[in-house]
């Protein structure tokens, strides 16, 4: 069964193994070991095979705002199809609203400075990226490996920091209850100090992506 976006939070609140991070300013949940080690390894291999320098819609004039590498993952890959199925079983969101799964790789010194996943209404890239598919709604992010030092995700506005943990899922609603964007979702993919960090991200839109 597919759900309307307004129903997703209630479904996730009932999901076994998914815990709400207690804070009134954000709808943020976490599940440890959402995917197993084999799937993590398969996804890492796909990222390494096709990675390229990451881009960003608006870097605020900072060429070092996002220094990671990125990989758009092919839906036909068995590991990708398996993860898509697990996400749908968890969140029930109509798959047509989902952007393609994206993998990110962070080497030593690489980061993604504090940013939001939504596009700022009225901003220079809002019409370009939201005219057809609408705003981003939910984000689902999965850590694929341990990182020897650094690489945490910090939600500064709510004082929460999450260390990479293989298979762990973080998901959050980029909107407030009234449907407006939530600036409290500002988060920083902090610099990797030692090792390499791999994550998977899935974003959903207001209107069909495909």
Image: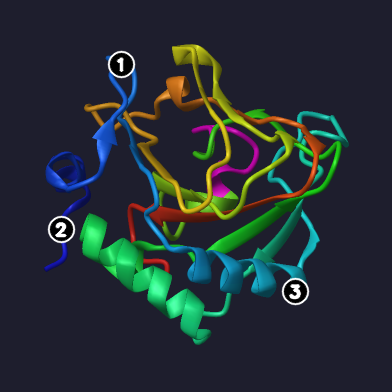
Which-is-in-front pick, marks 2 and 1? 1
Crowd rating for badge 1 (residues with CA inside 10 Å; few <14, some 14–19, many 20+): few
Q: Is residue 10 left or right of residue 208?
A: left
Q: In percent of the image, x 58 and y 40: which residue is there?
A: 164
Q: In percent of the image, x 44 and y 14: which residue is there?
A: 158
Q: Is residue 110 left or right of residue 23?
A: right
Q: Position of residue 209 (x, y in %)?
A: 42, 67
Q: In percent of the image, x 68 and y 45: which residue is there?
A: 57
Residue marked by disc 2? 3
User: Mark 1: which secondary structure?
Assistant: loop
Residue marked by disc 3? 50
Quadrant of image for the N terminus = bottom left
Please state which of residues 82 and 148 is positioned toward the viewer in this rendering: 148
Q: Are marks 2 and 1 in contact (CB under 8 Å)?
A: no
Q: Main secondary structure of the magenta part?
A: loop
Question: Is tag 2's residue or tag 1's residue first in the polypeptide sequence?
Answer: 2
Which residue range is magenta in the image? 120-127
């Amino acid at each position: 069964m597919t759900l309307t976006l307004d129903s997703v939070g209630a479904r996730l609140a009932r999901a076994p193994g998914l815990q709400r991070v207690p804070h009134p300013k954000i709808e943020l949940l976490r599940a440890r070991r959402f995917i197993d080690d084999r799937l993590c390894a398969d996804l890492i291999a796909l990222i390494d095979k096709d990675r390229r320098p990451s881009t960003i819609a608006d870097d605020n004039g900072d060429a070092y705002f996002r220094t990671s590498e990125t990989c758009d993952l092919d839906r036909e890959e068995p590991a990708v199809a398996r993860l898509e199925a697990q996400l749908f079983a968890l969140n029930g969101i109509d798959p047509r609203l989902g952007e393609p799964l994206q993998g990110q790789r962070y080497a030593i010194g690489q980061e993604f400075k504090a940013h939001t996943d939504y596009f700022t209404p009225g901003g220079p890239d809002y019409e370009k990226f939201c005219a057809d598919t609408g705003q981003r709604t939910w984000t689902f992010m999965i850590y694929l490996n341990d990182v020897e030092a650094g690489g945490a995700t910090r939600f500064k506005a709510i004082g929460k920091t999450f260390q990479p943990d293989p298979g762990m899922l973080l998901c959050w609603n980029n909107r407030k209850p009234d449907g407006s964007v939530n600036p409290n979702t500002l988060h920083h993919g902090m610099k990797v100090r030692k090792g390499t960090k791999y994550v998977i991200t899935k974003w959903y839109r207001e209107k069909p992506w495909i």
